[in-house]
């Protein structure tokens, strides 16, 4: 459920950033201040997408490490992705290019993780993981 919420939020904010960029093109204004403000809004909305990317990774890591839904390496990669995505959220409040780079790496890890797990799922089709049931208290 956590991954689903994170994935939906990440997708919605991703579309929101595209809408902001589109508004710059549609406005076709010569007002430099408006263009800069819309660009900064795009960066802020995009950086907040890192929170939802971290939620996505957190849910994947929990499902992987607790329930063995995917191989353990996928869970650890998801934990790294969550931490990188959270560092990228700092792009809202800074002009530091290192923080923006972490935000980009977080986005790239979401895409890379999805492709790698998709290939793994296709390669192991029919085998299926041994899913461990949750302990009830």
Image (tube, rainbow, N blue to C red):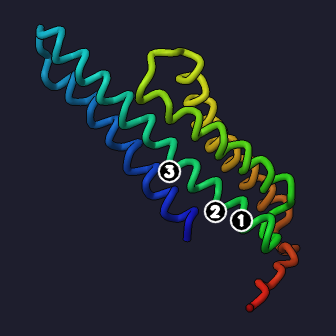
Work out how far the residue at label 2 is from the one at label 1, CA to CA, in angstroms. 5 Å
Which residue is at 61% across, 36% downward?
A: 106
Q: Neighbour class for label 1 at 10 Å: few (<14), some, many (≥20)? A: some
Residue at disc 3, secondary structure: helix
Instruction: Tell me which corner region of the image, top left, top right, bottom left or bottom right, holds residue 2.
Output: bottom right
Which residue is at 82% across, 70% downward?
A: 68
Relative placement, left or right, of 27 versus 108 is left
Say which label, 3 or 2, has the lower sequence index.
Answer: 3
Q: Position of residue 79 (x, y in %)?
A: 73, 49
Relative placement, left or right, of 72 versus 9 is right
Above or below: residue 60 compared with residue 53: below
Q: Position of residue 16 (x, y in %)?
A: 32, 42
For the image shown, how many numbered marks are present on the structure? 3
Say which label, 1 or 3, has the lower sequence index.
Answer: 3
Residue 52 is tagged as 3
Instruction: Tell me which corner region of the image, top left, top right, bottom left or bottom right, holds residue 38.
Output: top left
Residue at mark 1: 62
Instruction: Tell me which corner region of the image, top left, top right, bottom left or bottom right, holds residue 14.
Output: top left
Task: Please report contact status of discs 3 and 2: CB closer than 8 Å, yes or no.
Answer: no
Residue at disc 1, secondary structure: helix
Q: Quadrant of the C terminus?
A: bottom right
Residue at disc 2, secondary structure: helix
Above or below: residue 18 compared with residue 97: below
Work out how far the residue at label 1 is from the one at label 3, CA to CA, in angstroms. 15 Å
Q: Neighbour class for label 3 at 10 Å: few (<14), some, many (≥20)? A: many
Relative placement, left or right, of 130 versus 9 is right
Task: Please report contact status of discs 2 and 1: CB closer than 8 Å, yes or no.
Answer: yes
Q: Residue furthest front?
A: 137
Which residue is at 20% across, 29% downward?
A: 23
Q: Quadrant of the N terminus?
A: bottom right
Which residue is at 42% across, 35% downward?
A: 46
Residue at mark 2: 59
């Amino acid at each position: 459920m956590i991954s689903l919420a994170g994935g939906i939020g990440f997708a919605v904010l991703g579309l929101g950033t595209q809408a902001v960029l589109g508004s710059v093109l549609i406005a076709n204004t010569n007002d430099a201040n408006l263009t800069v403000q819309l660009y900064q809004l795009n960066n802020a909305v995009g950086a907040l997408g890192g929170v939802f990317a971290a939620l996505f990774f957190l849910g994947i890591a929990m499902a992987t490490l607790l329930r063995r839904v995917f191989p353990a390496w996928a869970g650890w990669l998801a934990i790294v992705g969550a931490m990188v995505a959270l560092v990228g959220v700092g792009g809202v409040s800074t002009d530091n290019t290192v923080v923006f780079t972490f935000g980009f790496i977080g986005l790239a890890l979401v895409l890379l993780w999805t492709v790698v797990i998709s290939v793994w799922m296709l390669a192991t089709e029919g085998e299926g993981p041994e899913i461990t049931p949750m302990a009830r208290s």
